Image: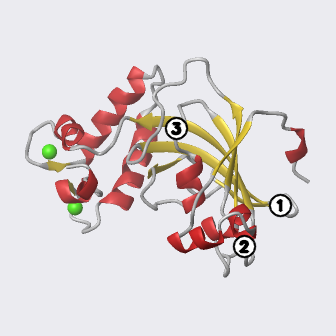
Amino acid sequence: MHSGMMWRLVTWTMCVFISSQLWSVWATAAELDSKVKVEVLFKPEQCTPRSKRGDLMNVHYDGFLAKDGSQFYCSRSDKTGHPQWFVLGVGQVIKGLDIGMMDMCPGEKRKITVPPALAFGEKGKDPVPPNAMVVFEVEAYMVSRGPRSMEAFRDIDRDKDKTLTKAEVKEHLKLDYAKEGKPRDDAFFERIVADIFRKSDNDRDGVISTKEYNIYEHDEL
Ligand SMILES: [Ca+2]
Ligand SMILES: [Ca+2]
């Protein structure tokens, strides 16, 4: 059994509407089902930068079933074995995590409880059973200043050829980590770059184009 009952921490909830239809059943059971619950387990004194939509985040997260505390996912023991990189707020992780990891700073730890509709839904996803409430323990390692603006792109694109090579992305990450006082070895960055390209280099031509980079240009440009 997971030690979920041990936490005595500030709790707040964010009300999330799954769809506009829910307005008609507001304040009914559906409302309770649609909430993501966020508990802050640890917050550094210097809590900046705070994550927002479009930021690149590097996070360790472990997933548990709410009903019995059994663990179904652990990024530490996952085959890749390193913190996961993703862009916040754009559907690269389940909806409940996109919501629950907003406004989070490097070093912060949270427990995020997600109703099935914002997690794996009616069908579930093996080994998560259908209609399962899930709990994630997340720890943010890096919040890379976003959003993915063209200013940031130009910053990374050192030779100004409007594409990002692996070398350019790696250099940028190294600078980011150095700024945070967290230098890492080369293999660490190699893995992160591979992960980023796997998620962002959609046409697999080995570089990230402006289009591939600026994935939500409609509300940023
Ligand atoms: Ca370039
Ligand atoms: Ca590409």
Kindly check if marks 3 and 1 are in contact, taking CB atoms under 8 A apart as contact. Answer: no
Residue 20 image point, x, y percent = 51, 70
At horizontal 63% and vertical 57% (from top left) the residue drawn is 78
- Residue type pointed to by label 1: Ser
- Which of the two discs, 2 and 3, labels the residue nearer the N terminus? 3
3D distance between C-alphas at marks 3 and 1 = 28 Å
- Residue type pointed to by label 3: Asp
Circle 2 or circle 3, nearest the eye: 3
Res. 3 in view: no
- Find residue 103 and name its label: 3
At horizontal 70% and vertical 41% (from top left) the residue drawn is 12
- Which of the two discs, 1 and 2, labels the residue nearer the N terminus? 1
Residue 30 image point, x, y percent = 70, 69
Q: Which residue is mark 1?
A: 70
3D distance between C-alphas at marks 2 and 3 = 30 Å
Task: Give the SS element for disc 1.
Answer: loop
Task: Give the SS element for disc 2.
Answer: loop
Circle 3 or circle 1, nearest the eye: 3
Q: Which residue is mark 2?
A: 127
* Quadrant hosting residue 73: bottom right
3D distance between C-alphas at marks 1 and 2 = 11 Å
